[in-house]
Image (cartoon, rainbow, N blue to C red):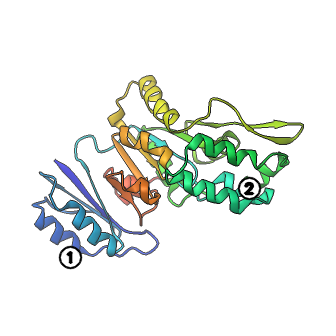
Amino acid sequence: MHSVTLLTSPERPHLDPVLVDSLRNAWGGGDAVWLAPDEAATFDMMRMPGNRWDVWAECQGMGVDLVITPAEGRRKKMLLADMDSTVIQQECIDELADEAGVGDRVKDITARAMNGELDFEAALRERVGLLEGLDEAVIGRVLSTRITHMPGSKVLLATMKANGAYSALVSGGFTAFTTAVAAALGFDENRANTLLVAQGRLTGDVGHPILGKQAKVDALEGITATLGISETDVIAVGDGANDLGMLHRAGMGVALHAKPAVAAECDLRINFGDLTALLFIQGYAIDDFVS
């Protein structure tokens, strides 16, 4: 049994009941349940349709995300989330680079690394090296003036936690940011890289070992083992190439507004919804949301 979820942008909800009913009929689905008026609906079906991706492409043209997941175990016991461009709307290292006057150069490296064109660890070391000599106080200024939470992040965390789920923020970014973001949103733990500082200024180096793609997989394995749950009990979300390991291993691996090369490797893709889409695809209705 599979669950089909159709959803749109919460800022411009326009999910057509005719689309939901026609797709349900074509795929032999059960009754449609509206999770949010004009925004999200779901139905169950017995078999995975052969024209899934053709229909997905048509839905994308209408501004609609189409997500198909196993119906069993739909609500997850753990959230594992990337931070940059996933839980927050920025790339922290790019914001620091702007302050250091090397923004364009670093942003180009970041974009290529997140799309899988560059080795993540080498790209991180190169970008951090360009920050050498930056005043440590800039980190606090960037946090307070440049960093904003992704829409839906607070509701996602609050709702899953209210339903007993554990949450972990695992980032290839920096602890100076993950600690603050995790505290603000209510994550149970956070893991990231450490920017090295000497005499109040960034040294241009990062603590080792570097937390990259494999470290996120290791976090998935280690945290689930500690909690005594299965990897199938996890919903993971990310947007970059260094997230693919955990997205492939988790019970639900969601590519959120992901880089093209990343989205192409993921079956669960959210391009129009915000982070509350992760609640809809687990079967939560908007009335279940906790603010």
Nearer the camera: disc 1 or disc 2? 2
Distance, label 1 to label 2, CA atoms, is 48 Å
Tell me where residue 73 appears, x and y as whole percent.
27, 40
Where 153 sits versus 121, above or below? below
Marks counted in the figure total: 2
Q: Secondary structure at mark 2?
A: helix
Give the residue displayed 50% in from the left and 54% down from the top. 115
Image quadrant in which you'd find residue 232? top left
Tag 2 residue: 97
Image spot of residue 282 (x, y percent): 33, 50
Determine whether, in the image, residue 75 is placed left or right of residue 114. left
Of residues 206 and 274, the one nearer the viewer is: 206
As shown in the figure, which amino acid type bears the numbered disc 2?
A: Ala
Is residue 32 in view?
yes
In front here: 80 or 111?
Answer: 111
Amino acid residing under circle 1: Val
Q: Secondary structure at mark 1?
A: helix
Q: Which residue is mark 1?
A: 18
Instruction: Tell me the quarter of the picture where residue 4 sits.
Output: bottom left
- The answer to whether residue 35 shows anywhere in this view is no
Please report the residue visible at 42 percent of the width from the left and 64 percent of the height from the top.
273
Q: Residue at x 37, y 57 (%)?
A: 269
Measured as percent of width and height from the top left, residue 210 is found at: 62, 34
| Chain-order first, disc 1 or disc 2 | 1
Q: In this view, which residue lies farthest toward the right?
A: 199
Decide if residue 258 is on the left or right side of residue 52.
right
Q: Residue at x 76, y 49 (%)?
A: 130
Q: Is residue 40 left or right of residue 178?
A: left
Q: Residues within 10 Å of mark 2 (few under 14, many from 20)?
A: many
